[in-house]
Image (cartoon, helix red, strand yellow):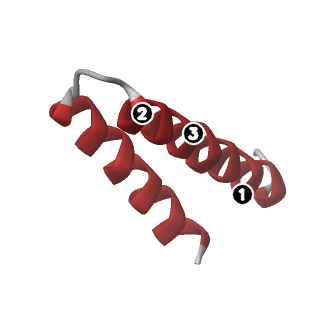
Amino acid sequence: MIPSVLITLAWVFIAIRCGVRFVHLLNRKSQDWLEMLFQFSVVLIALSFLL
């Protein structure tokens, strides 16, 4: 079984990576709204598991 600490770290890394990706997508000249919404929703889901 995978320890819960590793699962928590994985959720943290997912939230950080998707948050950074979301910020990069916001700074682009041409907006891909579907991709931005996807990245934002992944951050929200990861945070809901962590909190």
Find residue 13 and report its horizontal and vertical position in percent.
69, 43
Between the residue at mark 3 and the residue at mark 1, the CA separation in whole angstroms equals 18 Å
Quadrant in which the N terminus appears? top right
Tag 1, which secondary structure? Answer: helix
Mark 1 burial class by Cα count in 10 Å: few <14, some 14-19, many 20+: some
Q: Is residue 39 left or right of residue 11?
A: left
Q: Amino acid at mark 1?
A: Thr
Write down the quadrant of residue 27 in the picture.
top left
Residue at image position (60%, 69%) is 50
Location of mark 1 (residue): 8
Q: Amino acid at mark 3?
A: Val
Residue at image position (58%, 78%) is 51
Residue at image position (37%, 40%) is 39
Q: Is residue 49 left or right of residue 10?
A: left
Among the two numbered marks 3 and 2 on one chain, the one whose residue lies closer to the N terminus: 3
Q: Nearer the viewer, residue 34 or 49?
A: 34
Tag 3, which secondary structure? Answer: helix
Report the disc number at residue 24.
none
Q: Nearer the viewer, residue 17 or 51?
A: 17
Among the two numbered marks 2 and 1 on one chain, the one whose residue lies closer to the N terminus: 1
Location of mark 3 (residue): 20
